[in-house]
Image (cartoon, helix red, strand yellow):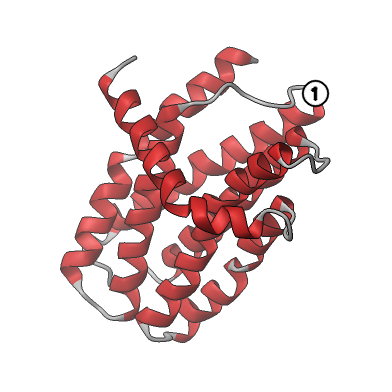
Amino acid sequence: MKPHDVFAEALARGLASTVAPIVHRVAPHCHPDTLSVARAALAAPLVLALARGWPAGAALAIYGVAWLTDLLDGSVARDRRRLGFPGNADRGELIDTVADKVLLLTTLIALASCARGAPGGSWYTAVLLATIAGEAYLLGKRLADFRGGTRSYPPMPLGKLKVGLQVIATAALIAAQLAPQPQLAVAGIALLAATLPLVALSIRSKLRRS
């Protein structure tokens, strides 16, 4: 296994162990698909926060809660299977993926629409648009593959690393947008740019499985 894969797997295990106590309490009472749908739904108040210039703390709180559900839903699904609850793993994986993409894409589109005057100018916008295009393609490909009979993909540690970096980068961009801090904006867009090769690798991987 490559070093970056080892790092990504270790990070995933660490996050899973951190939320394990919450998972054990939530699993018997909450369907994982509910958590995924809630994550997608939280995109609406987040866009409202960006559009109306709410305090950065409020927007980041919404964003943090949304991505917390991403840490929880997969673990809750596994815990429910262990406890004997029925479930459809393929459908759950699809709903989880769609919710991730809806939240990410909606946030990036909102940030792109507010990008006037952002540090870096056209470079800032170009990185946002490139990420939106890549992730929108991955979402469309996933939906098409599911309709074509490909119900799940093998785990991709680099995919988890990509999502983690995108979450951190986007959080920095949200904070910079609502409480103007040029350094945060530059750091966030640079980190988001660094994930573009991972987006390209994800696209290539999906195409090679077609």
SS at mark 1? loop
Q: Residue at x 81, y 30 (%)?
A: 147
Residue 206: x %, y % from top left: 57, 22
Q: Is residue 119 left or right of residue 16?
A: left
Q: Is residue 27 left or right of residue 118?
A: right
Residue 138: x %, y % from top left: 58, 35
Label tally: 1
Q: Residue at x 74, y 22 (%)?
A: 150
Quadrant for the C terminus, please: top right
Name the residue nearer the viewer: 153 or 179: 153
Q: Residue at x 34, y 14 (%)?
A: 1
Residue 116 visible? The answer is no
Name the residue nearer the viewer: 9 or 129: 9
Q: Is residue 89 above or below residue 170?
A: above
Name the residue nearer the viewer: 44 or 32: 32
Q: Is residue 117 left or right of residue 41?
A: left
Q: Is residue 48 above or below residue 145?
A: below
Residue 2: x %, y % from top left: 30, 17
Residue highlighted by disc 1: 148
Q: Is residue 178 above or below residue 198?
A: below
Q: Is residue 30 above or below residue 206?
A: below
Q: Is residue 26 left or right of residue 70?
A: right
Identity of the amino acid at label 1?
Answer: Gly
Residue 145: x %, y % from top left: 72, 26
Q: Residue at x 60, y 44 (%)?
A: 74
Query: In this view, which residue lies farthest toward the left?
Result: 183
Q: Residue 17 falls in which quadrant of the image?
A: top left
Residue 115 visible? The answer is yes
Q: Residues within 10 Å of mark 1 (few under 14, many from 20)?
A: few
